[in-house]
Amino acid sequence: MTLSESTYTLSNAPFNMTAMEWVHAYWMSRCVYVVAKLGIADLLKDGSQHCDALAAVTNTHSDALYRILRALASVGIFAEIKPRCFSLTTLADCLQSNAAESVRAIAILRGEEHYYKAWGNLMSSLQTGESAFEHLYGMDLFEYNDQNPTQGEIFDRAMAESEETNPLVLAAYDFSSISNLVDIGGGKGSLLASILQAYSNMKGVLFDRPDVIERAKNSWDLAVMNRCQFVGGDFFENIPMAADAYILKHIIQDWDDQRASAILQRCHQAMNEQGRLLVIDFVIPPGNEFYGSKFIDINMLIMCPGGRIRTEEEFQKLFESAGFNITRIIPTESEVSIIEAVKAM
């Protein structure tokens, strides 16, 4: 599993915001969280409703709910079409659970107490260089999710919302020469499933923690499932052997250099001599241009012990430490790139 949200990077930063609006931006985020948690957008999918009706269904105070929706409507999230009656807008559509580009789950995850408190302790990470989350809870986020299944489910739903980047990966890379592909830490396997659907002669292996693998089996189409093995394990210990290619999507960024290198070394040991390693990740470019991944990097700092978004130079050093040469870095139509590597000669 991963902590990134590749779908949710901004294509253009709102540079027209004033300094005071930047200072108060978290007010808007908190309002979005509560309406996402309450499912307000889902309640409006069939038409506008009065705040009294919405409050009755959500067990909230009508006037307080009105004030929140009025504030959000002022920035284009919902619209007050007549006194105290609200409808969806284009921005509010994505807060629906089943919208094509839904961000409801990620809005909820970002606002949950454990996540929000960790960001509230950003100063701790700044002073120590260590994970604020681990400082607060005495464990990393993955361990926390294991011990708190409800939060683990919220996390899983949020990560699933990044699946729409899969077509961008398929459009950018030709997988036709690969016969056997192993997806390391692939979660429920949406990327691997989409690749297998596109390449009917390919076989795959989905590798993740045993509990994740058990959940993944229930979400696959049977026709594609017949060409895939589901293997549970720990990528720090061992991974499936002798495949043509290994793919890691948003895995390396969760770890410090030592542990990231250890994962890559496991791939190096397992893969064929002529095999390929494909790391799908953000690559931070030089310069001052806005990239959402620069803020995702801060999320890694706070949430993951040692986690970080890397530059091309940092990736070069990391891959060399694990015995790989990067052959090319292929951009996609998002901030995500495909880093292709082979065993160093």
Image (spheres, grey):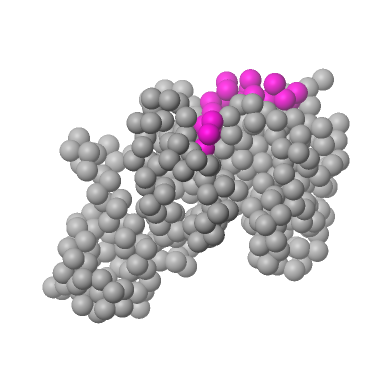
Occupied quadrant, residue 174: top right
Relative to 8, does residue 70 appear above or below in the rendering?
below
- Residue sitting nearer the eye, 225 or 208: 208
The quadrant of the picture occupied by the C terminus is: top right
The reply to whether the magenta stretch includes residue 311 is yes
Relative to 216, does residue 330 appear above or below in the rendering?
above
Residue at left 37%, top 45%? 117
Percent across and percent down for residue 72 are 24, 58
Residue at left 75%, top 63%? 224
Residue at left 27%, top 37%? 15
The residue sitting at the left extreme is 83
Relative to 278, does residue 82 appear above or below in the rendering?
below
Side of 184 where 335 appears, left or right: left
Side of 294 where 86 appears, left or right: left
Occupied quadrant, residue 256: top right
Whether residue 297 is visible, yes or no, is: no
Relative to 197, does residue 43 appear above or below in the rendering?
below
Residue at left 66%, top 41%? 248
The reply to whether the magenta stretch includes residue 196 is no
Residue range in magenta is 304-324
Side of 69 where 147 appears, left or right: right
Side of 20 where 246 appears, left or right: right
Whether residue 231 is visible, yes or no, is: yes
Percent across and percent down for residue 305 are 53, 34
